[in-house]
Image (spheres, helix red, strand yellow):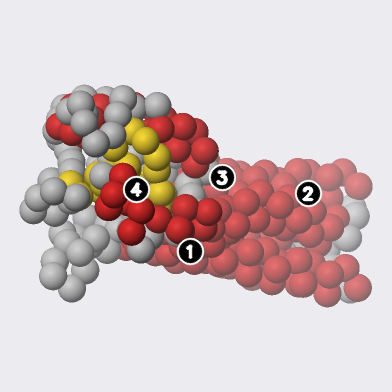
Amino acid sequence: MPTQSTRPEGGHYHPHEHSHHPHGHGHAPSNFNRAFAIGIGLNMVFVAIEAFYGWQVNSLALLADAAHNLSDVAGLVLAWMGALASQLKPNAKHTYGWQRGTILAALINAVLLLVAMGSLGWEALQRLQTPEAIEGWTVIGVAAVGIVVNSLTAWLFMKDQHDLNIRGAFLHMAADALVSLGVVLGGILYLYQGWTWLDPVMSLLIAVIIVMGTWGLFQQSVHLLFDGVPPHVNLEQVRDCLSALPGIVSIHDLHVWALSTSKVALTAHLVVADTGTDTSMLLATAQEELEEHFHIKHVTLQLESSAFAHGCRLSGHAEHDH
């Protein structure tokens, strides 16, 4: 036979089927259902409280933070929907399922946060031109509650930072806690100094800090959405790992991409020596090495003889690999 795939019925070789090196990449969404529910509920209540008191005391910082928190509630909903979508089983129309929904949710999450901070920055610049007095103690009290609510919500998403979707939710909540802390500090300084310009200046500084932190999430989400190699995978190291396997003559058409924010797939054509190669052992070893060193579990390998590889239509694509 000129070619051999890792498994006749689908081309995927999983000899241990998660029995070795369990990294838990496929279980993140179900683990966070409770966290999403609690986080959304807490933040909805806090948005209502913060918006009411911000309107009552005429604090831009509180009103802007309430709007920001509302965008984060939407972000949490999107992240939850993405996580749930990734659990839908593949079918004849969507052979990979809806796993990429987590990447899309992470991207939308980043965009929402950037837009919210842009709006906050614009309002702060407008308020700087006509600063207004605020009720310092009310601002401090409401913002202090915000620190508790947002820190608690961020803590719920802290344990699975390798998942980009979960990290997006965490960054949203951590950013909210930072905004609330800034509002508290601004309120304290206002009480002592009476600086009416402090409220919008503090809002502007917080917006800049959060944009700087969110930009990386946005870039990584776009990168993965367009089948970029996940950041934790070094393609040349993957190539070297496969090339070092016994019986491998050469490799071409190597591709690595993200199925979701927590699952990575790989396909490659491996040219094997014409004689003396135990292909079953070769495939088993390749799968184990890729899972152990790169956390890649979804592996599709096509084995080719030298004669077949010479005429393989994809053999000239090696230089265009991801």
Sequence-wise first label, 3 or 1 = 3
Check the image and report above or below for 81 versus 34.
below
Say left or right for 141 vs 313. right
Between disc 4 and disc 1, the foreground one is 4
Sequence-wise first label, 4 or 2 = 2
For image coordinates 26% across by 46% down, the residue present is 304
Check the image and report above or below for 256 versus 227.
above
Between the residue at mark 3 and the residue at mark 1, the CA separation in whole angstroms equals: 27 Å
Between the residue at mark 4 and the residue at mark 3, the CA separation in whole angstroms equals: 40 Å
Mark 2: give few (<14), some (14-19) or many (20+) Cα within 10 Å: many
Residue position for label 3: 174
Sequence-wise first label, 4 or 1 = 1
Q: Which residue occupies the foreground of this view, 152 or 245?
A: 245
Does the residue at mark 4 contact the one at mark 1 (Cβ under 8 Å)? no
Q: In which quarter of the image is residue 78?
A: bottom left
Name which residue type carries label 1: Phe
Mark 1: give few (<14), some (14-19) or many (20+) Cα within 10 Å: few
- How many marks the image carries: the answer is 4
Mark 4: give few (<14), some (14-19) or many (20+) Cα within 10 Å: many
Q: Is residue 73 visible?
A: no
Residue position for label 4: 268
Could you say whether the residue bearing mark 4 is in a helix, strand or loop?
Answer: strand
Does the residue at mark 3 contact the one at mark 1 (Cβ under 8 Å)? no
Residue position for label 2: 186
Sequence-wise first label, 4 or 3 = 3
Sequence-wise first label, 3 or 2 = 3
Q: Which residue occupies the foreground of this view, 183 or 103?
A: 103
Name which residue type carries label 2: Gly
